[in-house]
Image: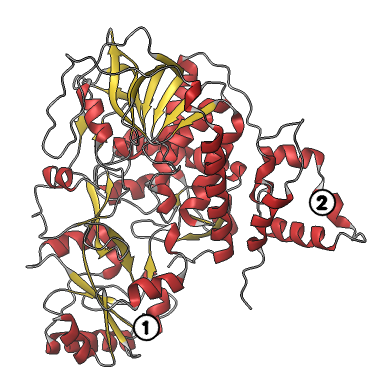
């Protein structure tokens, strides 16, 4: 199980993210842009495919269109931000457009884990890993991954992900084992998803070469003489439209798993579509990028490669909707509508989803007890506080039933009483024997419980949580080459158009089944590959990266300042030792000093008060 980050860390990250975004929004003036363009009256709207939103047909660019930048990036999720940062560092002028008013897309809400190969963190933990071993794991688990992309990923993940985010200030709390991996390689960043994405976004803000256009929806790609030359943008709040020009466009719009019509349309043929399915992807993962690429000739590939979970819980924050959470307790057991175990819980989605979809009713119940209750988890950076989980979910009788006996629990849950009692009794007996002879979940040589047996379900009260299929990740999407150029049906690149991240099905790296941490990792990698390709194409001379942290330490030698206690510096010394111990970047407390300005470089005492919660949690 993942270790939850401290509340103080998460609070600090959220405070910084909110304040940074507010500063950005207040500092941008839409009035500084030229007047927006609109579609001509004779331009038609294309008919959407079933489940795919309609977009206007390709437009002719008017003479008065705005010259936005060298590169326009559609989407401010982790793949778009990764591309923007490398482009900006390389000297390119970049405009990032997003429908939301905040950065990060679904990545900031995620667990944030990254699959990275042969890292210092692994070596420090005594884990021996290699690109060749990872290559074998990807192919064995994923079944039909894109071999060239897998080879690139395993060979370069240490450089393109680990070294890169480490330089940005991201730190990892642990490396954990997960299904399909020969060795632990799932790196968990401190602060979960927001702890991973915030440093990338923050550094984008410091460069001065990257502009963000919020609350704006790209509804159309502009095509002139066979080349993509810009986008048509609509303000989602006012409805006003304008056309922005650029030398190239990168689509980073995410997947389609929150568009249940598209999910149904491209559902794998070998499985029946469930009676009830919940949307568990990003709010804006609705397939807009797929349709825009298709409208200019882009090809969609392997769209039935969908990675969905069986742990979908209706989101208590959105009653009456189809939104769901990924919630589970891996120290419990899964039973079907007959009250019987039907799958190895630890086989995760690869085996769990097919097994669930073969049941008469595509729903299941997670059964656990009070002793394992602390292991209950909900994916997402906003669910790290167990008190919130307990209040909104575990103590919510509409979502979780609890009783002092298994028999009563079965009655409350609508499960056959004898079946559930027999199932739990047999499971407990096998725990005592030390081997799961039914599903091979634990026992000699099993990694899930190699050091201790799975806990018995024997401590009342007992809990039952009903879950449903939950959409999660798109592992098919817009076809790209190894330079992230969008391809047409003839496998030819469409000039000026690139795609990254989940929109591309994570470049096909996962095939049909995903190793954990192989979603955000490929998002970073494809974003950086697209940036490198464009920097060469645009003939921009790359500049060496200069982190703001380097600027701080070049003038302020903390080691020297803390080496000898000084009268009157007790608080300074205490807080800076603490931040050093935690590996924190200077910008977490001194965000008002970034970006660096020589003529205005002084501490804002009012802003600094926001960082007090980093150490003072107001709890005894």
C-alpha span from label 2 to label 1: 47 Å
Residue under the image location 19 percent in, 91 percent down: 407
Q: Position of residue 493 (x, y in %)?
A: 29, 18
Is residue 125 visible to the viewer in this orientation of the structure? no
Hey, which residue is sitting farthest right in the picture? 567
Residue bearing mark 2: 559
> For this view, does 469 lie left or right of residue 27?
left
Left or right relative to 363: residue 534: right
Q: Which residue is mark 1?
A: 455
- Asked if 441 appears above or below 120 in the picture, the reply is below
- Point out residue 520 in the picture as x, y percentages from the top left corner: 41, 45
Q: Secondary structure at mark 1?
A: loop
Of residues 362 and 484, the one nearer the viewer is 362
Q: How is the image coloured?
A: secondary structure
Tell me the crowding category of disc 2: few under 14, some 14 to 19, or many 20 or more residues within 10 angstroms, Cα based.
Answer: few
Q: Nearer the viewer, residue 58 or 249?
A: 58
**Which quadrant holds the C terminus?**
bottom right
Is 32 situated above or below 327? above
Tell me which residue sits at (22%, 86%) in the image: 409
Q: For residue 593, which numbered disc appears in the image?
A: none
Q: In the rendered image, which quarter contains the N terminus?
A: bottom left
Residue 537 in the image, given as x and y percentages of width and height:
45, 15
Disc number lying in front (2 or 1): 2
Residue at (57, 40) in percent of width and height: 23
Residue 235 found in image quarter: top left
Q: Is residue 28 visible?
A: yes
Label 1 crowd (10 A; few <14 / some 14-19 / many >=20): some
x, y percent for residue 512 = 24, 47
Query: Hey, which quadrant is residue 358 in on the image?
Result: bottom left
Q: Residue at x 40, y 40 (%)?
A: 523
Mark earlier in primary sequence (2, 1): 1
């Amino acid at each position: 199980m993942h270790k939850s980050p401290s509340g103080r860390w998460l609070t600090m990250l959220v405070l910084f993210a909110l304040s940074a975004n507010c500063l950005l929004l207040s500092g941008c003036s839409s009035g500084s842009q030229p007047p927006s363009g609109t579609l001509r009256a004779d331009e038609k709207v294309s008919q959407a495919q079933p489940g795919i939103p309609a977009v206007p047909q390709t437009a002719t660019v008017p003479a008065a269109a705005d010259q936005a930048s060298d590169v326009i990036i559609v989407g401010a999720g982790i793949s778009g931000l990764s591309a923007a940062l490398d482009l900006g560092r390389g000297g390119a002028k970049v405009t990032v457009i997003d429908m939301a008013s905040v950065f990060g897309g679904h990545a900031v809400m995620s667990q944030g884990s990254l699959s990275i190969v042969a890292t210092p963190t692994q070596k420090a933990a005594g884990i021996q890993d290699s690109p060749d071993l990872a290559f074998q794991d990807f192919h064995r688990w994923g079944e039909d991954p894109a071999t060239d992309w897998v080879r690139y990923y395993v060979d370069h993940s240490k450089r393109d992900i680990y070294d890169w985010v480490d330089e940005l200030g991201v730190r990892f709390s642990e490396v954990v084992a997960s299904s399909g991996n020969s060795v632990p390689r799932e790196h968990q960043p401190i602060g979960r998803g927001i702890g991973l994405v915030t440093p990338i976004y923050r550094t984008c803000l410091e460069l001065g070469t990257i502009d963000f256009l919020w609350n704006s929806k790209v509804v159309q790609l502009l095509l002139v003489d066979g080349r993509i030359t810009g986008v048509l943008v609509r303000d989602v709040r006012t409805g006003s439209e304008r056309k922005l020009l650029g030398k190239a466009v990168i689509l980073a719009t995410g997947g389609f798993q929150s568009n249940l019509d598209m999910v149904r349309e491209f559902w794998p043929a070998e499985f029946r579509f469930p009676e009830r399915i919940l949307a568990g992807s990003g709010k804006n993962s609705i397939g807009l990028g797929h349709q825009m690429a298709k409208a200019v000739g882009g090809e969609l590939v392997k769209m039935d490669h969908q990675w969905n979970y069986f742990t979908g819980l209706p989101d208590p924050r959105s009653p009456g909707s189809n939104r769901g959470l990924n919630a589970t307790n891996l120290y419990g057991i899964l039973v079907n509508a007959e009250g019987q175990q039907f799958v190895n819980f630890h086989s995760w989605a690869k085996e769990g989803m097919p097994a669930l979809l073969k049941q008469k009713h595509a729903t299941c119940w997670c059964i656990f007890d009070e002793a394992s209750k602390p292991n209950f988890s909900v994916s997402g950076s906003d669910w790290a506080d167990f008190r919130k989980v307990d209040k909104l979910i575990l103590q919510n009788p509409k979502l979780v039933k609890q009783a002092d006996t298994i028999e009563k629990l079965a009655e409350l849950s609508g499960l056959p009483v004898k079946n559930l009692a027999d199932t739990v009794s047999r499971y407990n007996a096998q725990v005592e024997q030390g081997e799961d002879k039914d599903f091979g979940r634990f026992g000699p040589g099993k990694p899930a419980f190699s050091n201790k047996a799975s806990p018995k379900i024997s401590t009342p009260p007992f809990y039952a949580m009903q879950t449903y299929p939950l959409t999660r990740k798109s592992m098919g999407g817009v076809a790209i080459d190894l330079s992230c150029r969008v391809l047409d049906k003839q496998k030819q690149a469409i000039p000026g158009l690139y795609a990254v991240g989940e929109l591309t099905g994570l470049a096909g790296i996962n095939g049909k089944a995903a190793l954990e941490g192989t979603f955000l990792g490929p998002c970073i990698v494809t974003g950086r590959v697209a940036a490198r390709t464009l920097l060469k194409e645009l003939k921009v001379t790359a500049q060496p990266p200069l982190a703001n942290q380097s600027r701080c330490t070049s003038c302020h030698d903390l080691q020297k300042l803390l080496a000898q206690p000084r009268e009157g510096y007790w608080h300074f010394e205490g807080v800076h030792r603490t931040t050093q111990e935690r590996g924190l970047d200077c910008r977490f407390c001194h965000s008002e000093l970034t970006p660096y300005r020589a003529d205005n470089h002084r501490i804002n005492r009012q802003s600094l008060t926001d960082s007090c919660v980093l150490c003072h949690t107001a709890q005894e």
